[in-house]
Each structure stands twice: as C-alpha cells, then as structure tokens.
Image (cartoon, helix red, strand yellow):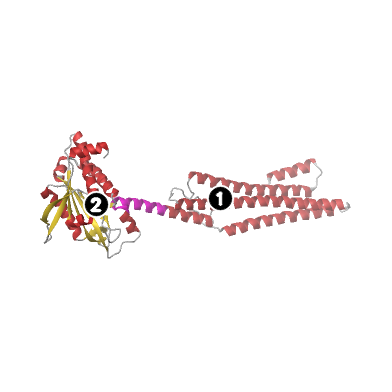
Amino acid sequence: MVAGLTMVIIYEAFFEPYIWTGIKVLISCFSAGLFAGMYHYLGAENSVIDTLGQRKSHSMPPTSMITVSKKVLILIASLLVFMALAVLMMVVLDIYYLLEFRDISGPELYWGVFKEIVFALAVMLFFSFMIMNRYTRNLKKTFGSHINAMEKISEGDLDTPVPVLSNDEFAHIAVKTNDMIQGLREREICHASFQKYVSPEISDKILRGQISPEGELVNVTILFCDLRGYTTFVEKKTPTDVVRFLNSYFSEMERLIRKHNGIVLQFIGDEIEAVFGGTTPENADADQAIAAALDMRKALDRINISREKVGEEPVRHGIGIHTGQVLAGNVGSPERMVYAMVGDVVNVASRLQVLNKQCGTDILISRRTKEEATESRFPLKAMGTFPVRGKSETIDVYTIESEPTAQRQVNHDLGT
C-alpha cells in the first residue's frame, strides 16, 4: 500500500496527471502486497513444519478449531472476491477513461484496454495458483508427518511426537496421536516394570487376559532352590552387601533357569521357586528342570571359587524337584493378586529341598520326576524312601551324582 501511494505521488508529480492511472497503480501494488503476504505466510508455516519435525517436538494444542474445509472455502472465496473486485475496479476505471477520452476512437484503444484487463486477471490467477499450491503442500506435509508418526509407532518407536501446527482437524489428530503415544509410552514403562516382578511369559498372559479366573490344571515340574546358612551369612554382612550378593546370585540362577525354558515364579527371601513345562497338559519338562539344577550347581562352584579368591566364605544351596499336576492361576484378593502354582506338587518340591540337609546332598528329585525324565541323560542315585512332612505316605528320592568341585572347575576352564 505504501509503495502504491509512493508511485501514485511520483506519477502525479512528474508525469501526465491522470488520476485513473494512479489508482490502477495503487490497486496493483495492493494486490501484489496481499498475494506476497499470503505466500510468505504459508512459506513460514512450511518452515515451522520442517523445524518441528527435525527437533521431534510439538507446539501447544490449539484452543479453538476451524475445519480444513472451512479454511479452504475462506481462502478460495477471499481470492475470488478480491480478484473480482480488482478486475471490476479496473473495468470501471477503464470505462471512465474511455468516457474521458471519448474523442479518441479506434479499435487499438479498446484492444489495449482488453489486454490490460486480461493481463491483470492472468497475473492474479497465477499468484492465486501459487498460493493454493503452497497451501496444499503444507497440508500434504502435515498429513505426511502424521503418517510417519503412525508408521514409527507400529515399529515400536514412541519418541517422535506429531507436530501441532494449526487449529484444524490435523491439529486435533496430532493432539490425540500425541496423547496415544504418551499412553503407549507409559504402558511400555509399566510393562517393563511389571516384568521385573513377574516373568515376561506370565506378565504377557496377565496383560492379555489369558489367565482364567478359575485357574488351569497343568502338568509341570517345580524346582525350589534355597541358600544354606543364610541367617549366619546375613549376620556377618551389612544389608547392602547382602542385597548385592543376592541380586548377583539370583541373576545367575534365573539366567540358567531361563536357559532351560524355566520360569521363575518368585524369590522368597533367599529361596527361588521355578516351574518347567505347562505349555501343554502332557509336557512337564522334567529333563529341563534337572539340566537347570546341574547348571546351577556348576554356577555355584564358580561363584564360590570367585569368593574364595577375595577371602569370602563359600555358600551352599539345596535344590528340590518334583513333577505333577498343579492349578496355575491368580491367587489373592480382588485388590492384590499374584500368579502362583497351587497343589501338593509344590509342597513336595519344597520339602525335598529341605530334605537335602538330612541326606547330605544338594539336589534331590522325586520318583515321579525320575520317571518323567530321560534317565540315561543323568547319573541318578537312589537315596531311599523318606517320609515327607505333611504327607502320610513316604517318597522315593534320588540325587544326581556330581563330580568333585576341583574336577568341575578343570572342566569349566577347558570349556567341557
């Protein structure tokens, strides 16, 4: 507008003073300024989209919303109305010009006026097309950012928010998508934290609602492992040292249990309760439980060798293994529940673990476990028949013969 007024003043001051020509110049400058402003505004919006996309950030959500269809309607209507008014004003000015110079005749004059109007209309149409093209490019880029975000979410990437760049449906979608990303991120945190307290297999079943309220009868092999002399050990150590040792010990034992497809159900003080099998009603995985117990024995030897090197006393543990049918499911109150294996099999496995003290062994298995296992794989030795606390009948128990500790260390060093 300022440029147009300046040109009008210069034209009127130094050239032939035709007021209509000055007004045309003013309209042209105003039109150019309006189109340039709209074009650069859309260009700035495009830059903001790119910047926010690179920074992986998003702006504040809009307080009000104008639909995309309404925005397009307003933009097109504004361009058409402005173009119509501009052309109409030029036509009116040219008519006044012709009336003022009506003594001038000839087709050249009318042809010149016609070309002037057509030229102005073509220029405005061209700039209108450029504005609409940039607006649609911004829409496409905004929509593309939403698609990219959804693709990353489907791939598990929850660190890229969708930029909120407008106050239309795209902004609403972006806000809701970011809320969804935040919810998924919190769910992942909860899931990861949950798996630290419950094994991944069990936590997945719980979160998917695959555990029946009545529980499920399954054939499993239960393993109990308990540290010997734990009370004396605790008395000689600070709580920090005790927790550090237990975390290291439990981590190694759980690794070996999982290596043989077992699941740690819970840590109870210095005791481990693990389960093998249960994937099918017939599969109890006794072989896997015994193999895990043997690896746990070797791992304890390695732990003790490391402890003796730094002047620490060795530690011992006892393992009891029993096979049979249990009820697997949630146990507790409606406010707090735990996943557990319930049944006589669990009690017997726990009693066998305690029976190691009486037998002077570190691993004891029941006859049922022996029958389920492949006997040729393991050097089993019958320990006799023993009464088990809480049961009226006696149980035949077996141990797994072991190599001397020194020989096991040689085999470990040789990789055998």
Q: Is residue 358 left or right of residue 305?
A: left
Q: Between residue 141 and residue 68, name the one nearer to us.
A: 141
Image quarter of the C terminus: top left
177 or 318, nearer to the observer? 318
Residue shown at 78%/48% (left/top)?
A: 21
In terms of depth relative to the viewer, which is nearer, 256 or 40?
256
Disc 1 marks a residue whose amino acid type is: Lys
Part of the protein shown in magenta: 182-200
Residue name at image x 52 percent, y 50 percent: 145
Q: Give, as a three-letter code, the residue at label 2.
A: Ala
**Residue sitting at the far front:** 376
Dot placed on the residue nearer the N-terminal end, 2 or 1: 1
Residue 316 pos. (x, y %): 17, 44
From mark 2 to mark 1, how far is it between C-alphas? Answer: 57 Å
Q: Position of residue 191 (x, y in %)?
A: 35, 53
Q: Which mark is residue 269?
A: none
Give the crowd class for mark 2: few <14, some 14-19, many >=20 residues within 10 Å. Answer: many
From where the camera sits, is residue 376 visible? yes
Q: Is residue 197 magenta?
A: yes
Left or right of residue 371: residue 125: right
- Secondary structure category for the residue under label 2: helix
* Residue behind mark 2: 289
**Residue nearest the viewer, comparing 146 with 316:** 316
Residue 199, horizontal then vertical, whole percent: 30, 52
Q: Quadrant of residue 231?
A: top left
Residue 141: mark in rendering: 1
Dot 1, how many residues are within 10 Å of its Cα: few (below 14), some (14-19), or many (20+)? some
